[in-house]
Image (cartoon, rainbow, N blue to C red):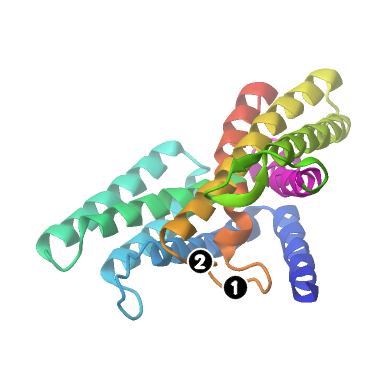
């Protein structure tokens, strides 16, 4: 527990420094985190197929991650560059699959593309939030997932009776999930007020309602994100995705729910906050 608390505190300090800095610092840190997250995912999904080191399937994915972040930084998150990079990765992996057949299997190709979308692309939306108008506030929203986790834990301990998804996570309960969502919405209301006051908004109540709606959806989906990551681990009989964060596991163990909700928050913020 001591190791977990200390590493968690260090993680929070690094997160604060990353989001406050913005610009190249935020993008650079997210790139590094995305590369690690991609490696953790492809390893869990068996892309290396028992080989030592990196194979060409994973290397192409890592190149695609670097290219995608480079284009995102250079062109301010224009979505056509996401599509372009995704198609590059798909075609490159397909060419390798065809001309090296039967060395690699189709499931490795599928896992490589899936992992690219799941970790690097979804994580990049933190940077896209950060470069929005008032992004110094909006970039914090994905981490509502950690508040949701905390409320869900205590609500589950106090009131939990009905299992939410027993085959994937025996300890999670419906009551805990509801508590997590309620906690997220309350935090969203407070965040909305702080956002409105600090941005000089003329529509404080509307902003509060918008943030409550965003955190309502994010709180519900963050728990799905956590269960998806757990499902992948159970599917491949692994305990943790990695060991980068002492006491927590890997990037995918700590950021699974954050990753899953970030694109949703980005698009909801665009629609509800007119940014």
Instruction: Please tell me how crowded label 1 is: few (under 14), some (14-19), or many (20+) other residues with Cα within 10 Å.
Output: few
Quadrant showing the N terminus: bottom right
Q: Is residue 105 left or right of residue 11?
A: left
Task: Name the residue: 71% across, 53% down.
Answer: 19
In this figure, which residue is indicated by the disc labeled 1?
A: 244
Magenta-drawn segment = 127-156
Task: Name the residue: 83% across, 33% down.
Answer: 186
Q: Is residue 82 left or right of residue 239?
A: left
Check whether the beta carbons of the residues at disc 2 and disc 1 lie within 8 A of each other. Answer: yes
Q: Position of residue 249 (x, y in %)?
A: 61, 68
Task: Name the residue: 78% across, 22% down.
Answer: 209
Q: Quadrant of residue 189?
A: top right
Residue 154 is one of the magenta-drawn residues: yes
Quadrant showing the C terminus: top right
Residue 125 is one of the magenta-drawn residues: no
The earlier-in-sequence mark between 2 and 1 is 2
Q: Is residue 205 left or right of residue 44?
A: right
Q: Secondary structure at mark 1?
A: loop
Q: Quadrant of residue 177?
A: top right
Instruction: Please tell me how crowded label 2 is: few (under 14), some (14-19), or many (20+) other residues with Cα within 10 Å.
Output: some
Q: Position of residue 32 (x, y in %)?
A: 54, 65
| In the foreground, 263 or 108 | 108
Q: Secondary structure at mark 2?
A: helix
In this view, which residue lies farthest toward the bottom? 52
In this figure, which residue is indicated by the disc labeled 2?
A: 36
**Which label sits on residue 134?**
none
- Mark 2 → mark 1, Cα distance in angstroms: 9 Å
Judge depth for marks 2 and 1 and give the one in front.
Answer: 1
Task: Name the residue: 42% across, 57% down.
Answer: 235
Q: Position of residue 126 (x, y in %)?
A: 61, 47
Q: Is residue 236 left or right of residue 257?
A: left
């Amino acid at each position: 527990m001591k190791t977990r608390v200390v590493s968690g505190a260090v993680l929070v300090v690094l997160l604060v420094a990353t989001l406050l800095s913005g610009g190249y610092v935020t993008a650079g840190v997210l790139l590094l985190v995305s590369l690690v997250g991609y490696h953790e995912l492809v390893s869990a999904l068996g892309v290396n197929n028992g080989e030592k080191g990196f194979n060409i399937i994973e290397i192409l994915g890592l190149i695609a991650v670097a290219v995608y972040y480079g284009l995102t930084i250079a062109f301010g998150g224009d979505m056509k560059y996401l599509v372009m990079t995704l198609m590059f990765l798909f075609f490159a992996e397909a060419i390798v699959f065809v001309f090296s057949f039967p060395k690699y299997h189709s499931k490795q190709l599928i896992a490589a593309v899936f992992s690219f979308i799941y970790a690097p692309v979804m994580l990049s939306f933190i940077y896209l939030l950060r470069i929005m108008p008032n992004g110094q506030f909006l970039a914090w929203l994905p981490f509502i997932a950690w508040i949701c986790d905390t409320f869900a834990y205590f609500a589950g301990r106090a009131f939990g009776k009905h299992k939410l998804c027993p085959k994937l996570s025996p300890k999670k309960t419906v009551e805990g999930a509801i508590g997590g969502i309620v906690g997220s919405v309350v935090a969203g209301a407070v965040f909305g007020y702080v956002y409105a006051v600090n941005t000089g908004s003329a529509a404080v109540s509307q902003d509060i309602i918008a943030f409550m709606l965003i955190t309502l959806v994010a709180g519900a989906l963050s728990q799905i994100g956590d269960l998806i990551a757990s499902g992948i681990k159970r599917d491949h009989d692994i305990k943790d995705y990695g060991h980068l964060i002492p006491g927590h596991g890997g990037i995918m163990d700590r950021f699974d729910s954050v990753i899953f909700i970030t694109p949703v928050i980005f698009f909801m913020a665009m629609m509800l906050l007119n940014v």
